[in-house]
């Protein structure tokens, strides 16, 4: 079926793992070299397909963490303890292994510098991944589109890309980052300590009169809570884009 | 896992639709045959299972598109879609 694919249709391709990066105790970035990759837009994802020796196949979607400007495709994968695919990707995969993937996918949950802002990015856990592609894309263009990231993690060590985010916001007065830690906080923590709610959004988000473009990504429950609260606060539903990850290994 | 937790966005159907159609499908606009709501597939609600993918109207919850995948074939049911608008300039 793949061999007869028409131009423009997605096909399954092979990528080679050139590097594995530990991001947090539960997440790993897979740096892939994908021959013939035609580029992507920040916010897109790929489907990864694994085939067992008996022919059984299963697929999962993973967001692309790298910006369009990068030569290689980076996926950041969270290990779900009862997952069928993610434990293999985070623990079984070795440098040099090949991985079957289909993409890039999706033109809806995407952002380019030309789309402007202000940009309101809201992430729960590994929901940061497609938003990180947007932040990296924005940085690659030295864009000054006012951007606010509200990022919910379980605890300090679970914050994915923590150092890179801190460095980017320290160097860029138009990029503001607010963390909330829902499960445990370091002794010196002065930030939020609860799940994202309507009150937090009212404090952190741009007012509806600024007409921010909002991207919300994370576990389904978080995404639906946030999207409903934003609309309730007066934000235009057409400017609130969501990407639900489904159930995750826990709550953030 | 509950049914609610399996609810995804239209984006999640982008892979299988992109393998069938030459158009970027998550930005394609659909008119629901049940309630006449209009919106991009990316903003619809998707339930993906081993049996197939169901894309439901975010307004009324009825099925817009069903896709099942078998050996060497796809089955696509568009009976819940009144009209599909595709962007040809991409």
Image (cartoon, grey):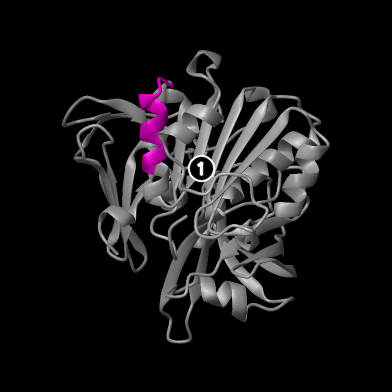
Question: Relative to residue A128, is residue B80 depicted above or below?
Answer: above
Give the prevailing secondary structure in the magenta stretch: helix
Residue under circle 1?
A106
Q: Is residue B61 visible?
A: yes
Q: Where does the image place residue A245, in percent across and percent down from the top left? A: 44, 53
- The residue nearer to you, when weighing B46 against A118, is A118
Tell me which residue sits at (57%, 36%) in the image: A121
Extreme residue in the top direction: A209
Corner quadrant of residue A206: top right
Residue B27 visible? The answer is: no
| Helix, strand or loop for disc 1 | loop
Q: Identify which residue, B17 or A228, lies in the foreground.
A: A228
Residue farthest toward the left in the current orientation of the protein: B34
- Residues shaded magenta: A224-235
Chain holding disc 1:
A
Residue drawn at x 60%, y 73% is A90
């Amino acid at each position: 079926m793949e061999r007869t694919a028409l131009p423009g249709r997605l096909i399954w391709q092979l990528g080679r793992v050139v590097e594995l990066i530990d991001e947090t105790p539960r997440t790993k970035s897979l740096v892939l070299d994908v021959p013939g990759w035609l580029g992507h837009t920040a916010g897109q994802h790929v489907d990864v397909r694994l085939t067992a020796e008996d022919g059984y196949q299963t697929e999962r979607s993973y967001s692309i963490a790298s910006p369009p400007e990068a030569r290689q495709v980076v996926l950041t994968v969270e290990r779900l303890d009862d997952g069928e695919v993610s434990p293999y990707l985070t623990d079984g995969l070795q440098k040099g292994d090949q991985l079957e993937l289909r993409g890039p996918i999706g033109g809806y949950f995407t952002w380019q510098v030309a789309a402007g802002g202000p940009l309101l990015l809201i992430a729960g856990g590994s929901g940061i991944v497609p938003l990180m592609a947007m932040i990296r894309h924005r940085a690659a263009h030295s864009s000054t589109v006012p951007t606010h990231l509200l990022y919910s993690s379980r605890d300090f060590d679970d914050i994915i890309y923590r150092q890179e985010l801190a460095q980017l916001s320290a160097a860029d007065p138009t990029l503001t980052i607010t963390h909330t830690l829902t499960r445990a906080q370091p002794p010196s923590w002065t930030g939020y300590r609860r799940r994202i709610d309507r009150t937090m959004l009212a404090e952190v988000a741009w007012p509806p009169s600024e007409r921010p473009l909002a991207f919300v990504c994370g576990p389904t429950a978080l995404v639906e809570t946030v999207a409903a609260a934003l609309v309730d606060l007066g934000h235009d539903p057409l400017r609130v884009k969501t990407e639900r990850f489904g159930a995750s290994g826990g709550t953030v | 896992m509950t049914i609610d937790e399996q609810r995804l966005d239209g984006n999640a159907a982008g892979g299988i639709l992109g393998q069938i159609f030459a158009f970027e499908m998550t930005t394609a606009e659909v008119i629901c045959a049940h309630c006449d709501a209009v919106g991009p597939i990316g903003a619809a609600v998707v339930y993906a299972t081993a049996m197939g993918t169901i894309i439901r109207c975010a307004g009324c919850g009825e099925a817009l598109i069903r896709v099942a995948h078998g050996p060497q074939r796809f089955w696509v049911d568009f009976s819940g879609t009144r009209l599909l608008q595709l962007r040809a300039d991409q």
